[in-house]
Image: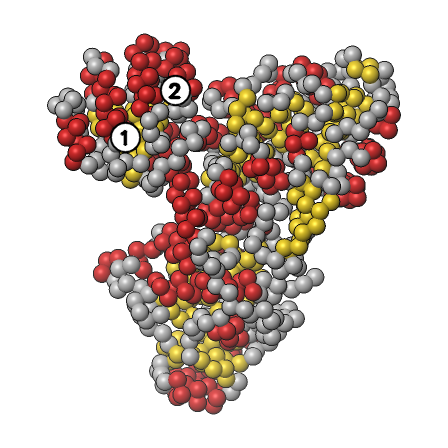
Amino acid sequence: MTRNDDLRLRTVPHRIILSSAADSTTETITVRTDLERFFSPKSIALIGASQDLITISGQPLSHLGNHGYSGKLYPVNPRYQEILGHKCYPALADLPETPELALILINAARVADMLEQCGKKGVPYVVIFSSGFSETGGEGVALQKRLAAIAEKYNIGVIGPNCQGMMNVADKVWAGFGSVFFTKEFPAGGVSMVSQSGGFGFSVLALSSLDGGLAFRQMVTTGNEIGVSTLDFIDYFIRDKQTDVIVAYIEGVKDAHRLHGIGMQAMDAGKPVLMWKVGNTDEGQKAAASHTANLGGAMALYKAAFKQTGIIQIDDIQDMVDYGRMFRSRKLPAGNRIAMITVSGGAGILMTDECIAGGMKLAQLAPRTVEQLRAFVPSYGSLGNPVDVTASIFNDITLIRRTLRAIVDDPGVDCIALLNASLQGELAAKIAGEIIAIANTTDKPIACAWSARDVMAKDAYALLDDACIPHYKSPVRCGKAFAALSGYADAKRRIAAQRNEQPLAMEKNQLNQILTNRATDVAEYEAKKVLAEYGIAVTQEELATTRDQALAIAKKIGYPVAIKVQSPDISHKTEAKAVRLGLKSDAELAAAYDVVLANAKAYNAKAQIDGVLVQEMLSGGTEAILGITNDPLFGPAVMFGLGGIFAEIMKDVSFRLAPVTPSMAREMIAEIKGYPLLTGARGRSHADVDALVDAIVKLSALAVDLKDQVAELDINPLFVMAKGKGVKAADALIKPKVKN
């Protein structure tokens, strides 16, 4: 259910509690196991229900009744005798039974007392609609903490506060408020969604169901999440047999360290997770001494988790609808090679561009396939890919079936798109039938870009929908959805292969003495000692505390050398002008020694100076940067990028959550834009990528072993030498994890 570390498990009613023995900073994880009781309660209490059915406190009872809820409803309000024909009770304690769900519809000041009553009554799930808590700051924060304490005391599954409720479309439980709830009905389907925004989440449901043709099973909004979290709901959707596709709209999750495990569970279950992550800009992030922390931020780690688990990031409602429709077919391509059949050359070009941008390839049709096509495709058409059968289909509708049959049978084709322009009416329905007949004989995904208006091709579209063949109004949307499907299938294969790999275990279980009880930065000399313990090669160097010692060390190493002031109070030595490179003689070294010390003291008069590091000068190779950031939500993550402007200005870096296996390290290296610089671009020598992979894997082992001691770590630069020559760390910095 979570990461593959040492987990201690204990059970209490309705939940599993997981606590990590390996990570003392991770809070206890509560995973509720009976959320079906929340979505399909046999009885609901509505605390603060009103006879004014337009108000927030009046709507839920009305909506539940109007949409066919079959359980028992218990309005609670001492002001009324009855509401909508239901007996109204003066207090929760007066109910004849314990409801499985309570909806709290009163003002914020009274919520805590009412939640306490729910706890005493034994109510398992409570939705708090009320606002006025942590989102308002001040006293609201304290009030929300009180709610959390009550929920923990009584083991109540709290949803909210500050949320808009939930909708179980399949079982007719419309427990919420807002304009969407006045809709007569929504079609039931296999999409389940959790949203941290109530209004936006339900608007997505409405637009997707009514205009997008994507039917929902369940929707829940979580608001401030003091209890049941977004990831708890995703965990439930994974286990829910009637959910096929999972969607989440998040601003951030407090239990982010669970995201990797949740993603892997979803992948194992074959349920795509479409994640809509917002709030991704860098503004407001606190500056840090290490480059890794500055280049990372929360979104970089979310993206790392998405990549590692096959979670699909979406950016718009249209993406959600289009990808969801594509996954409805439950067919995954065996590779990323797509073939297209078109009656319009322009549409083929549009879709080709989108597919290639999404990581797909145009399939190279086999000679046998081309010869088959040559027998019936008009001479003025095209036998290449995209295959253009031209407008001749108006004269011979079997052209589509025969062309599709030949391409489906081609072993070099993984999926097929049909670009049917704006075919309408009876012809469109007949061609849809031809497509369905072939689609039913193959496991290869087939989709259509069909631009006719709904009213002009409604019969064709209905046939395709019934057969779960996705269709889109534009070739661009079709191509983008195919790329998402292909990417998910590729992630599934990649993750299956990576499970055969074991992350490096260095068995460094003892606390590192350099880092023990450390409150200040660990400067380069000592930081490299920690790296060396993990087998990461470092420059030849020694620490000098006098000019004469520096001269002696330089003679031992051999000129040219570099010198750098070592101080836990000066993180960026270059900014302090406390570095000199390429010193070629005793005279140059002696003069530079005095200068760097003077500059360091001028930069920070109170800085503790440990000495001057004398080290070998490296030449050749490509400068890279490696790092660790130990995020309070995600835990340790590893970063890679090329040095210089690539990392500092372009932020051309990649992240992975630790532990990182060799194949994952290769992915990190290959996905940056500057990767060709390591593989011989423009006549450069090939870099030692194998040694770079080894260094990343060893740094990952360090990140896991020392996660209780290391907050951030930089190796900058790491010189990647020519193939077979290895890598070497030229500078390093560690920020210790200081315990409060």
Task: Tell me the element at label 1.
Answer: helix
Please say if 10 is above or below 211: below
User: Residue 638 location, x and y as percent?
Assistant: 49, 58
Name which quarter of the figure residue 557 lies in. bottom left
Along the viewing direction, whichever of 643 and 361 lies nearer the viewer: 361
Q: Do the residues bearing badges 1 and 2 touch, measured as CB atoms within 8 Å?
A: no
Name which quarter of the figure residue 202 lies in. top right
Q: Residues within 10 Å of mark 2 (few under 14, many from 20)?
A: many
Q: What number is the disc on residue 464?
A: 2
Residue at (51% x, 60% y) in the render: 628
User: Residue 726 location, x and y as percent?
Assistant: 35, 70
Amino acid type indicated by mark 2: Leu
Left/right placement of residue 131 relative to residue 682 reads: right
Q: Which residue is mark 1?
A: 408
Q: How many marks?
A: 2
Residue at (38% x, 51% y) in the render: 671
Task: Tell me the element at label 2.
Answer: helix
User: Residue 547 location, x and y as percent?
Assistant: 48, 87
Along the viewing direction, whichever of 145 and 534 lies nearer the viewer: 534
Residue at (63% x, 16% y) in the render: 182
Q: Which label's residue is closer to the chain start, 1 or 2?
A: 1
